[in-house]
Image (spheres, rainbow, N blue to C red):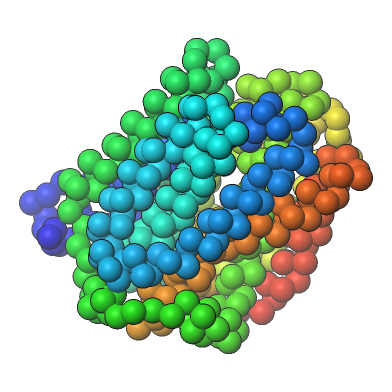
Amino acid sequence: MADPLDLSRPWFLRPGAASFGMMFATGAFGRAVLLSVVPLEAYLVLGSARNVSIMFMIVAAANLLLSFGIPALIGRFRRRRVYVGCIILCAMAPVFLATGTMAGLPLGALCREFGGTALFIAQNLYMMDHIAKRDFVKAEPTRLFFQALAWGIGPYVGVLLFARVDPWAAYGLAACASLAELFYFRAIRISDMSLLATRAAKPKNPLRFIRRFFIQPRLRLAYTIAVARSTWWSVLNVYGPIYMVKSGAGEEAGGLIVGACNMLLLITPGIGWLARRTGVRRVVIGAFVFSGLATSTVALAYPDPWAGFWLFLLAGLGVVALDAVGTVPFLRAVRVSERDEMTMVFVTYGQAAQLGPMMLFSVLLSFVDLPVVFVVTAIVLVAAAWTSRWIPRGM
């Protein structure tokens, strides 16, 4: 086990915000390479945005159900082994996708989604173990900053390799990046510390801690904020590439729009600085309103590809501000004795932000065209701005 205060080790091999960010970004790059490849390949194979919505709805539902078993996995095998196993699962996802079959496409997508969800749970637990609560407002933007290049470059590189080189080039790069995270994780030697490691051996009833989560008003509020901002990312990741293809800009433009919006994560340290001076509450409300208005104009711009491109980027500025500080209400509200259970429930916001919208869009897109997706998303963002008034003023 590595001592985080062991100054004989290089800073990037000691547990901390910067080293965590670099390690998480390594694996994130592998998942990012597939981010735009999966919806574009699904669109080619399935033939319509409606069918793509149905596939992602099924994947999100399966991921949500499987996610409730993650605490039991941690309790049975410990956090380190679960982390390693899910890295390997993420590395297997490109192999299934590379088969190009109707079975391999959703299976690969599910491996990527579930592996990423489990890793995110473990990452949050490690962050809470090694970083003091008062430092979360600084640590979270730092983590996002290191992941910005991964999520910014990955989608475009993935589509470029897939379309111009060979699909196996994209899939191989994704698998190698996931395995690189495994080597970094082993090198940094993060310990399973605090009472979490002791409590992990106790069996956990998902229904009990789901109820416990949602009877706490501050955790409900944190979940609502997270679902709303993640809804925008789900829409961008699936329908942004489809928007660019349907408007005639092509597959590479689809990867470019997703990558460019993710590259905006580079501004998160600045957002963290602003939040520390003006308060998280003001930043969250303002960002929701701004991104909601910008997203609504994407519907008006359709089918102009490059007007849509710049409007996506404009909306992305607001959502990135939410990413910089949107997790802080949860990190500040969760009790130390409940971190395992409450973190597991909290991170289901990603699946909820896919499952609900994809169910709705699979129906709406049977009757109306693509712009309805952006109108509905804008309504969700503005409604979240209203709900965010309940964030404590002192946060």
Residue 219 vs 15, above or below: the answer is below
User: Does residue 160 appear anywhere in the picture?
Assistant: yes
Q: Position of residue 103 (x, y in %)?
A: 56, 37
Q: Residue at x 78, y 55 (%)?
A: 360
Q: Position of residue 248 (x, y in %)?
A: 79, 21
Q: Is residue 204 left or right of residue 282?
A: left
* Figure quadrant of residue 159: top right
* Figure quadrant of residue 42: top right
Residue 2 vs 202, above or below: the answer is above
* Figure quadrant of residue 163: top right
Q: Is residue 381 left or right of residue 22?
A: right
The mark total stands at 0
Quadrant in which the N terminus appears: bottom left
Q: Is residue 240 left or right of residue 279?
A: right
Residue 140 vs 341, above or below: the answer is above
User: Does residue 136 appear anywhere in the picture?
Assistant: no
Q: Residue at x 45, y 21 (%)?
A: 168
Q: Residue at x 71, y 20 (%)?
A: 250
Residue extending farthest left = 8
Q: Nearer the viewer, residue 84 or 203?
A: 203
Q: Nearer the viewer, residue 24 or 280?
A: 24
Residue extending farthest right = 367
Q: Position of residue 131 (x, y in %)?
A: 31, 66
Q: Residue at x 50, y 71 (%)?
A: 345
